[in-house]
Amino acid sequence: MKGTVTFFSDYRGYGFVQGSDKREYFIHVSQIKSDGQKTLTEGQDVSFTPKETKKGSQAIDLYITETEIKPSRPISISLKRNPFTPQDPVVHAQKFSGRFDSIANAIDALFNHKNILIIGPRGIGKTSLSYQLMYMAQGKKDLLQKFKIDLGGYEFDKLSGDHRCVPGNDLSDICNGLLGTLCASSNEQLQEKSKKVAFGVDIKLFKYSTETTTTTPSPTDISFAFVSEVESIIKRMPHLRKSIVFVIDEVDVLDNDIEIAPFLRATSEKFRLNNNVDVSFIVSGITGTITDLISQHPSVSRLFENISLPRMEKIELEEIIDSCLDGTGVAIDQQAKDDIVKLSNQFPQPVHLLGYHSYKIDSNNVIEIDDVNAAKSFIVSDIKRQDFESKFDGINAGAMTEVIRAMAQAPLETINFNFMRPRLRHMSDDKILGTIGGLREKGIIEKQHRDTYRFCDPLFKIYLRWLFGIE
């Protein structure tokens, strides 16, 4: 079929072609087949194969039919250090915002030798808070100074060890990770305070279970061995305080048969009974099987202070933006800031994601709504497109697709049940509500208020509006 290019964005990597049948077809850069051409110009004549998909009309195998090929021009790239960190936890205290109540509770728990369990949905900032607390426990005062917290003369001065769990980890892997990072922490303090030669520790102890025996040691066996190793390290550094904080992050990725709750209970109680070293654990993970096992395990509740992270308030989200831009020479207008906050769904990670790409796109040292709109389009069409396609493919065809199409038509972020009803006349109220329940179980939508819902990721709604051709 022949057609004409009506729009194409090099930055976004996609555009639209009007076919000879007067229909609009989506075209992705990967479908441009002309040699040496990976861009299109508005008004350009093309030929393509039309294809109907569940995502709409698309143009594939597109060729440019104009004989004149414009020479490519050199592209100049201006690099600048981006203050937003969507891919990493917040490590600089000056960029850490909100969570004052959680910090206050954690300080009290650490002072009273309690362990901390940080729970909440993915992207809510558990890892950032965990590591900020670890830095504070080490004696760094940046977080305390930012929030103007006075400890009344008390100063934390703990050694530390940390381990970020990955799928397939067992208790031995966690112990080895904690011991390895504890050694690094110990070496730093030894060199700084007593100028002694750095040392290491043999952590092969935890490998015997898989290398030399067929019997898997119990959580108690591993716990006692771990405590013994930690105490042997402490004995070798008399110049340092006998106080340690251990961070175990991402426990939700562990297999359900990993008995981390009994291990934590046995380890905490063994350290207390031995009375040789003060140890606190900071454990974080999304609410799920593993974290539920920890919080619900008998006697764990008296050893752990549960800190559940709520969604952030508007003022806290705005503070993230302001603190990241502070000192960069780049400002942001209120409309752009409001849009970023609205799209964040009260989570910090989307603020960093939208802020990162808005900052990258900005060309006049003021992030404006056009910069945010361009960032949204790029994120939806490129950064998160594969994730969104997978999410859409996981939705059952039929009722679920019809419901999310109706929801995507809503002009506001929150969608009332009464808005959907006239758009789904062929479905009964019970059928609509049942379908909504299924979408909630899949993590696609969430209940905002009574009979009011919203997409868990507002950017997914933007993707759906493009997918369904909703203006």
Image (tube, helix red, strand yellow):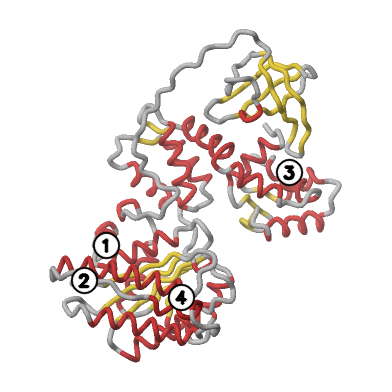
- Distance in Å between CA atoms under marks 4 and 2: 33 Å
State the SS at label 1.
helix
Q: Earlier in the sequence, mark 2 or mark 3?
A: 2
Q: Residue at x 50, y 84 (%)?
A: 217
Task: Describe residue 206's horizontal placement relative to residue 417 as left or right.
Answer: left
Q: Earlier in the sequence, mark 4 or mark 2?
A: 2
Closer to the chain start, of discs 1 and 4, is 1
Q: Nearer the viewer, mark 1 or mark 4?
A: 4
- Residue extending farthest to the top is 68
Q: Quick one: which residue is furthest to the front in this view?
A: 212
Residue 429: horizontal and vertical position, in percent?
Answer: 81, 55
Q: Which residue is mark 3?
A: 406
The residue carrying mark 2 is: 155
Asked whether the beta carbons under mark 4 and mark 3 sit within 8 Å of each other, the answer is: no
Callout 4: SS: helix
Q: Amino acid at mark 3?
A: Ala
The answer to which of marks 1 and 2 sits earlier in the sequence is: 1
Residue where numbered disc 4 is placed? 172
Mark 2–mark 3 distance (CA, rounded to whole Å): 56 Å
Q: Earlier in the sequence, mark 4 or mark 3?
A: 4
Circle 1 packing at 10 Å, graded few (<14), some (14-19), many (20+), is: some
Q: Residue at x 39, y 62 (%)?
A: 129
**Classed neighbour count for the residue bearing mark 4: other residues with Cα under 10 Å, few (<14), some (14–19), many (≥20):** many
Residue, far right:
426
Residue at which label 1 appears: 144
